[in-house]
Structures are given as structure tokens and as C-alpha cells.
């Protein structure tokens, strides 16, 4: 069954964050998004011009309507609107018909542009939501307002500390469990862009979708981070301020457990002739390495194609199948008798690869690359 994700959050008229970003994220990751809107905002990339809170009774009515008919596997909570609504939603989440739903709480307080979306009374009421949440996902400013790491963990929720607001060229995100402390961390180069409106909403919704699909928390966070980074890199550049991300462009990127057929490598005799030909075909060249005889092109749907003069791939075509859980997938296949020429290993170009040959002698590469397929550091 398609994973059912209920989003309890505010609307963003500019389409960059809130309900709009949540729906796009859940949809792109294969889930079914449902909503209980807590507030309507008038906002764009430069800030929030107005907020109209939805009455608590109507928020609960939206939740009841969804639960009684469609059902819910996970709940993502963002902008909550008021202290009264926060307390009422927390109480509603304890009812038997939502007892099995994983809850991801993104304690939205201030937008990227600096607009305040939660008053002190609402922030105090966040404790009720954290006690029900599987994971809470504050940025550094929000974490301080919630009493720091110990303050969140004391409520029994796992904690994902987002490092995007920290200084430095490297972003560090850390995952904490109440009884185990820090259990995972991820480090990645900061993506230099002002078009980052909705990153927190997007990450929380991605994690909620993963949990709804049965993923454990850590891989759900890892996939969510990959989705956010790709959406940042794909940002369309709209607006005069903090623009929206490119959720719509994150596709064929191997974010699922199963295989995505998204890359093929072809042998070439003449580097210049081959690169000119595929440009003429309408593909966009994204890697240009004539010294290695290697070029990579991107199609409009995000699938890539490479040409390679010499090297390991000179003997023929190599078809690439990507998985967001490569090692588990290879282990599964190996237990069922599939023989590999190369078990998973990290390559110098940032991909993790396993290699094998099909019964007809065709060469296959099973791999995991995240953002490095379409956005390697050396992308043109």
C-alpha cells in the first residue's frame, strides 16, 4: 500500500515551504500526502506579510476526516498556529486510531527570512508534541528555544539537530536517541545558495515519508538529507529573496531501496566527435574530462549518459542501476545466488559500486551516488 502521510502545518502562498513543500516532498518520494492546515499565510521569498490561524476545531475536523476514511501511517507536524491547537493535536495523536502512526515534529518558529511563526505560549506547548513524536527536527535556533539537546530528549523523542544555521563550509547534522546519545552524524559541503526556503519542512516530510514506508529512522534521515540537497541544487531561482527549492527536479536519483535505471556508459573512439554528437542530440553536458576521455550528459528527465574513450569501460556498454540501500540490496541478491565480479566498494569519483555480468555477458554496475551522479564537484 502507498504510504499515507498526514501533514499538520501552515500554508505558504509563495509555494516554497509549509504545506506546499510538504506535499511535493511526500509525492516525489512515493507517498500519498494529506493535510490538516493550521494557518494561512500571505508570504513570498522576501518574508511573511500576514498570518491567519485556522480555528483549532477546524484543524481537528481535518484530521478526523482523513483518519476515519483513508488512514494514516505517519504524521508530519510543522507550523502549528497556536498553543491551543498544539495541545489539541497532541491529545488527538494519543487516540487509538493514530497510535501506530510515526510522528515527525518540526518545531517551526522563525522562517528563513526571519518572520516569527510561533509565540512564547505556543513554544511552551511544544512539549506535548515532543512527547508523542518519534523524532523532533529543530534547527540550532529552535533547539536553543526548546532547552537544548537534553531539553528535547527529556520528552522521549529522538532528536535530529540540523546544522544548516551553523557557520563554516561544512554542514553537520546529528541524530540523538534518548537513551543512547548521538547515534549518527552526517557531514557534507555547504551548498552556496539563497534559494533555500523550505529546507526544514522538506527534510521533516521526507523523514515522515520514510517512516511511513517502513524505513528505520536513520536511513529515513539519510534519504531525506539526500533529497534536500538535490532539491537545493535543483532550485529554479525564483523570487527576489530566499527562493523555493527544486523538489520537482529530484527524480531518477536512486533514493529508493529498489533499482533506478538512470545511467549508461558507452564506449567511444573519438572524444570530440562523441561529445559533439550527444550535444547535438539535445543532452546537456555536465562532466567534461578530455584527459580521461570521459564525458557525462544529462537528459531532461534527470537520467544521465556517459561516453568513455579507453579505461575500464572501453570494452562495451555498462548499464547502471542505482539503489539508496546498495549494500543491503547486493547482500539480498548474493544470498539468492547472484554472482558479483566486484562487491560494493567506494570509488574515487564518489560513487559506491558493485559490478556483475548478466547471463548474456552484458556488464552491469549496481551503485549508490546520491548527489554525485548529477552534481559531482567537477560538474560544468
Image (cartoon, helix red, strand yellow):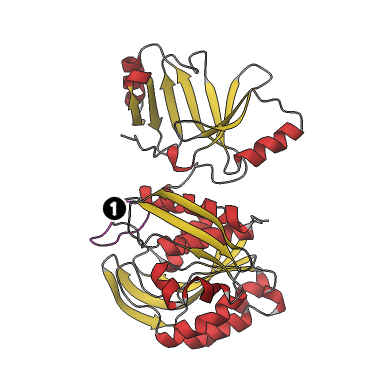
Residue visible at 45% across and 75% down in the picture:
79
Query: Is residue 66 toward the left or the right of residue 126 in the image?
Result: right
Query: Is residue 225 toward the left or the right of residue 365 in the image?
Result: left
Measuring from the top left, give residue 337's x and y in whole percent. Answer: 76, 29
Seen in the picture, residue 326 relative to 120 is either above or below; the reply is above
Measuring from the top left, give residue 368's x and y in whole percent. Answer: 54, 38
Residue visible at 52% across and 13% down in the picture:
315
Residue visible at 61% across and 66% down in the picture:
74
Residue that carries the numbered disc 1 in the rendered image? 237
> Which of the two residues, 44 or 114, is positioned nearer the viewer here?
114
Asked whether 367 falls inside the magenta stretch, the response is no
Q: Which residues are magenta?
A: 236-246
Q: Which residue is most to the top?
A: 269
Residue 58, can we see it?
Answer: no
* Residue 100 placement: quadrant: bottom right
Give the main secondary structure of the magenta stretch: loop
Measuring from the top left, give residue 15's x and y in whole percent. Answer: 37, 64
* Residue 299 placement: quadrant: top left
Circle 1: element type: loop
Amino acid at each position: 500500500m502507498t504510504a499515507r502521510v498526514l501533514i499538520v502545518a501552515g500554508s505558504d502562498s509563495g509555494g516554497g515551504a509549509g504545506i506546499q513543500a510538504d506535499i511535493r516532498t511526500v509525492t516525489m518520494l512515493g507517498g500519498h500526502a494529506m493535510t490538516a492546515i493550521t494557518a494561512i499565510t500571505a508570504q513570498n521569498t522576501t518574508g511573511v506579510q500576514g498570518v491567519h490561524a485556522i480555528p483549532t476545531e477546524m484543524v481537528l475536523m481535518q484530521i478526523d476526516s482523513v483518519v476515519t476514511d483513508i488512514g494514516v501511517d505517519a504524521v508530519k507536524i510543522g507550523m502549528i498556529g497556536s498553543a491551543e491547537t498544539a495541545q489539541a493535536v497532541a491529545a488527538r495523536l494519543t487516540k487509538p486510531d493514530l497510535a501506530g502512526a510515526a510522528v515527525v515534529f518540526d518545531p517551526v518558529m522563525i522562517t528563513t527570512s526571519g518572520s516569527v511563526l510561533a509565540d512564547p505560549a505556543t513554544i511552551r506547548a511544544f512539549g506535548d508534541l515532543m512527547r508523542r513524536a518519534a523524532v523532533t527536527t529543530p534547527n540550532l535556533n529552535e533547539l536553543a528555544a526548546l532547552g537544548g539537546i537534553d531539553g528535547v530528549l527529556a520528552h522521549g523523542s529522538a532528536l535530529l539537530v540540523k546544522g544548516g544555521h551553523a557557520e563554516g563550509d561544512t554542514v553537520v547534522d546529528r541524530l540523538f536517541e534518548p537513551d543512547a546519545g548521538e547515534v549518527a552524524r552526517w557531514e557534507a559541503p555547504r551548498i552556496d545558495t539563497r534559494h533555500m526556503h523550505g529546507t526544514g519542512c522538506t527534510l521533516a516530510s521526507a523523514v515522515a515519508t520514510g517512516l511511513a514506508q517502513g524505513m528505520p529512522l536513520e536511513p529515513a534521515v539519510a534519504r531525506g538529507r539526500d533529497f534536500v540537497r538535490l532539491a537545493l541544487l535543483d532550485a529554479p531561482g525564483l523570487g527576489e529573496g530566499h527562493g523555493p527549492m527544486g523538489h520537482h527536479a529530484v527524480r531518477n536519483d536512486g533514493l529508493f531501496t529498489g533499482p533506478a535505471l538512470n545511467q549508461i556508459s558507452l564506449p567511444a573512439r573519438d572524444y570530440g566527435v562523441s561529445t559533439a554528437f550527444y550535444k547535438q542530440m539535445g543532452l546537456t553536458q555536465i562532466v567534461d574530462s578530455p584527459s580521461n576521455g570521459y564525458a557525462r550528459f544529462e537528459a531532461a528527465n534527470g537520467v544521465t549518459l556517459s561516453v568513455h574513450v579507453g579505461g575500464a569501460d572501453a570494452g562495451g556498454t555498462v548499464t547502471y542501476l542505482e539503489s539508496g540501500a546498495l549494500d543491503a540490496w547486493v547482500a539480498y541478491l548474493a544470498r539468492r545466488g547472484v554472482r558479483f565480479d566486484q562487491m560494493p566498494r567506494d570509488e574515487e569519483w564518489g560513487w559506491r559500486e558493485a559490478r556483475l555480468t548478466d547471463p548474456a555477458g552484458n556488464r552491469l554496475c549496481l551503485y549508490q551516488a546520491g548527489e554525485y551522479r548529477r552534481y559531482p564537484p567537477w560538474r560544468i
